[in-house]
Amino acid sequence: MTQDGLRLLVCVNPVGSNKPSCGGDRASEALAARLEQGIADRNLAVTVERIHCLNRCLRGPAMRIAPGGKFYLEYGEADIPRILDELAVEAGTAEDHPEEFDFGGSAPGS
Ligand code: FES
């Protein structure tokens, strides 16, 4: 359903080597789960991918829209509704990305 939609790369790295980490002291795994629930509730064409490091460790929790989209840094639970609003504008819903198109028999010879 979301193969044509956006990917949200959420850093859940639990281990920071001598620095903070998104999934360690900043609990981004819970935020990723909250984002997935919000995306499902709104039926957005976005897939959450948990990754380990976006090289923004000092400003985590960090995530990024892919391919090549904006970063979200130092976000928290209170920011998630606004982030979901932005994702809805960027990606649309699953209905905007149907897996097949039915043209109702308008092809020549049909
Ligand atoms: S640990 Fe999340 S950006 Fe590096």
Image (cartoon, grey):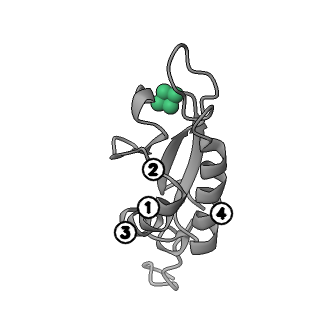
Instruction: Tell me the mark number nearer the camera, choosing from 3 and 1.
Output: 1
The Cα atoms of the two marked residues, 1 and 2, are separated by: 9 Å
The Cα atoms of the two marked residues, 3 and 2, are separated by: 19 Å
Q: Which residue is mark 2?
A: 75
What percent of the width, then of the height, locates residue 59?
40, 35
Instruction: Tell me the mark number nearer the camera, choosing from 1 and 2.
Output: 2
Residue type of the residue flagged with mark 2: Tyr
Q: Secondary structure at mark 3?
A: helix
Q: Secondary structure at mark 1?
A: helix
Look at the picture and state if 40 lies above or below 6.
below
Q: Which residue is mark 1?
A: 83
Q: Are marks 4 and 3 in contact (CB under 8 Å)?
A: no
Residue at image location 50% in from the left, 53% down from the top: 76
Residue type of the residue flagged with mark 3: Val
Q: Earlier in the sequence, mark 3 or mark 2?
A: 2
> Label for residue 37?
4
Some atom of ligand 1 lies within 8 Å of the CB belonging to the residue at label 4: no
Residue at image location 49% in from the left, 48% down from the top: 8
The Cα atoms of the two marked residues, 4 and 2, are separated by: 17 Å
Look at the picture and state if 16 lies above or below 43.
above
